[in-house]
Structures are given as C-alpha cells and as structure tokens.
Image (cartoon, helix red, strand yellow):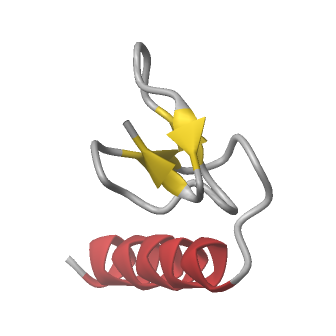
Amino acid sequence: FFVFSIVLTVFVSSIKNSFNVPPTGICWAEKDGDCMRCDCRRPLKCYKGTCR
C-alpha cells in the first residue's frame, strides 16, 4: 500500500505539471476545448483557439 501511494503521488504531480505548461501533442482537447497548447482530438480542428 505504501509503494502504491508513492506511485500515485508521482503520477498526480506529473499530471499537474503537464497541465501547467503542456507542450503541443501531450494533452488532448475535447470539443470546445482550448487548443492553444493542446491538440484537438480527431476529427476536430483548431479554430480561433477552440476545438470544433
């Protein structure tokens, strides 16, 4: 259980860091999501900063 909590903590902290300054392609934006720093899920396209 102790090892699992350590792994979970590292995992959550890495997710938090990726949301602060995500490089393009790391995170995926849904419909009407922000695609300035993320890629849109297919078949959505980035239009004026939002996925459509």
The one nearer the camera, 1 or 48, is: 48
Which quadrant would the N terminus be assigned to in this image? bottom left
The one nearer the camera, 19 or 50, is: 50
Where residue 4 appears, as percent x and y from the top left, is 30, 71
Q: Above or below — where is 11 with respect to 50?
A: below
Where residue 39 appears, as percent x and y from the top left, is 60, 40
Q: Above or below — where is 41 with respect to 30?
A: above
Q: Residue furthest front?
A: 48
Q: Is residue 42 left or right of residue 10?
A: left
Which quadrant would the C terminus be assigned to in this image? top left
Where residue 31 appears, as percent x and y from the top left, is 28, 43
Q: Residue drawn at (42%, 25%), measured in percent from left and top? A: 44
Which quadrant holds residue 35?
bottom right
Q: Residue furthest right?
A: 23
The one nearer the camera, 40 or 2, is: 40
Count of numbered tags: 0
Q: Residue drawn at (50%, 72%), measured in percent from left and top? A: 15
Q: Residue drawn at (43%, 28%), measured in percent from left and top? A: 41
Q: Residue furthest top?
A: 43
